[in-house]
Image: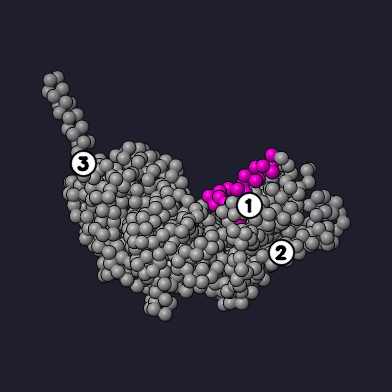
Amino acid sequence: MLAALAISPQALFGQLLLGLINGAFYALLSLGLAVIFGMLNIVNFAHGALFMMGAFCAYFLLNGLGLNYWFALILAPLMMGVFGAALERLFLKRIAGLDPVYGLLLTFGLALIIQGVFQNYFGSSGLPYAIPAALSGGRNLGFMFLPNYRAWAIAFSLVVCVGCWFLIERTKLGAYLRAATENPALVRAFGINVPRMITLTYAAGVALAGLAGVLAAPINQVRPQMGENFIIVVFAVVVIGGMGSIMGSIVTGFLLGVVEGLTKVFYPEASNTVVFVIMAIVLLIKPAGLFGRAS
Amino acid sequence: MKSRLAFALTASLMLTSAALADDKVVKIGSLDDQSSLYADIGGPGSTLAAQMAVEDSGLTKKGWTISVIDADHQNKPDVGAGVARKWLDEDKVDVIVSLDNSAVALAVSQVGKEKNGVVLPSGAASSALTNKACNANTIHWAYDTYALANGTGKSMVKAGGDTWFFITADYAFGHQLQHDTTAVVEASGGKVLGSVNAPLNTPDFSSFLLQAQSSKAKIVALANAGGDTTNSIKQAHEFGLTASGQKLAGLLLFITDVHALGLDVAQGLSLTSTFYWDLNDGTREFSKRFAARMKNHAMPTMTQAGVYSSLIHYFKALEALGGNPHDGAKVVAKMKEMPTDDPLFGKGAIRADGRKIHPAYLFEVKTPADSKYPWDYYKLVATIPGDEAFRPLSESECPLVKK
């Protein structure tokens, strides 16, 4: 059957593995978005721009302070978290409780400003960021050559995604967070500082976007537009997975990465649009998303 | 009463004839991708090149009023055509330059013909602009896919690369470049083993590169440009494509792409270009002035140099006509009559099909050790004379060419 489809099994496995790797990026990015939407009901359109800022942080840490990739993996998300907390305090707090459309418009505007500023200074061709020495090279798996960095990317994403899911769904801190967003007044009555939790949650979501940016920097050129390509797909992932569901967005991220990978083999011209076709179908059949709870 | 009537009649006749005479007002529009993957190739740099052409022509001192405006076509032919229509209809723009996207350039070229403006693409690559889609209002400057295929394609087949696989940007430019290069490869005795169409502005080429690797072709040709090319080359290195013996052919590479990649990754790549900032004293003098005024101090690309060169010649034609007739076909006909000469592209000519002819050069990207100063990226390998680089008129399907 595979021969009839004009592709060898080895090539197909290679493409599936590549699809999984891309899916890992989608999962990591959509995790941050799902956390922010699920917990705070903010449609964070600035996510792509913040992902790009994470990659630029990694670039500046290397070229300005001489701190390599491994430092950037920890420092860039921290820097982005602080920036996210500032954004929440300065802008998002003022529209809390209003129609979600305000949040959408505000974050979209922020995204345009951030991208515009970076583009003004750095142009569009991008800046080089090398793969760290320890992760360079690759191994021949027989059916394809797998770069070590890509193997690391998928493993690291999995660990972070599962870790975050565990933190939110299975720990006391996560329980407070979920309660604080469902019923802030009651949780505040228990003496928990709800505004601070909200700031920290948004900061955490932004930090995840920054982390994804550091992970992407060595394989995509560090460009101001790098967030643009991802953000729309990531939104589709979150919508398909169910907008409140953390596990939904992780699983859907990987799943859609594989689907996109297969499309690139059989009909590459559609690889940009297949995610939206699936989103349209899912919305028609199950509007709450694959893992979402109908509210 | 009679004398008053006579006076009124004479006055109105004088006024109408004054309106019909050529004036010294020119409005230039630079239409480009200002924000996406091609923005560094043309973009704000093309607007600067246009302004420099206005200043260097000396026409403002001779009483001419020349203004430069720009807009973003966002790589969408409908947006580009809409802007061109508004410019030519309402905003009194006389000439549209740069156009760094072939699909947009083809659409705008048609609008230019409809509205009798002048269209001078320097960024677009598709050789169809002077072939099937040629018209009397368009002159294709700088380069085209035929020259790229002839330069890089022919030389790589001669050097032993006889099997090819294409990764093609899925729109007018990519398809035309693949078509023209395939013709050259097959004519030189090579074979094309396969190809894959990648959507424009793809961030991840890993899947397409994997297909290229399994084809076992000796040459993996990248029929794309700008951000797509830099991503493809970077990821090709990551996937060990070059380490396993296959060679990369960056069919369209600009100096800003090499700068973005860094010489570590880009070294050894062959490319064809009709302009390099460090080629001779003329190009160096212009480029240093250009880089000083650019925000990121980048050296000019082939497209930006083309914008400058095309406008210098356009101004010479206007001066020869004694004013701006606001008649696109008339100005283009004058431009075709006059031989061209500027410090950037040297001596050349414009053919009946609207193709600007000048020499093309085959370059190789230097190794980091060979690069002695900033932007010292290219090593000249060969010079291809103008009449060999571009499609010969005998093969042209342009209706303007008399056979």
Labelled disc at residue B22: 3
Q: Quadrant of the C terminus of chain B?
A: top left
A15 to the left or right of B123: right
Work out whether residue A218 or residue B183 is closer to the camera in this orientation and state it: B183
Q: How many residues crowd around disc 3 within 10 Å: few (fewer than 14), some, or many (20 or more)?
A: some
- Mark 2: amino acid: Leu
Question: What residue is pinned by disc 1?
Answer: A1
In the rendered image, the residue lying farthest to the right is A190
Q: Could you tell me which quadrant the N terminus of chain B lies in?
A: top left
Mark 3: amino acid: Asp
Q: Give the mark toward the camera: 1 or 2.
A: 1
* Camera-nearest residue between B201 and B326: B201
In the image, is B395 to the left or to the right of B199? left
Q: CA distance from mark 2 to mark 3?
A: 70 Å
Question: What kind of residue is marked 1?
Answer: Met
Residue denoted by label 2: A158
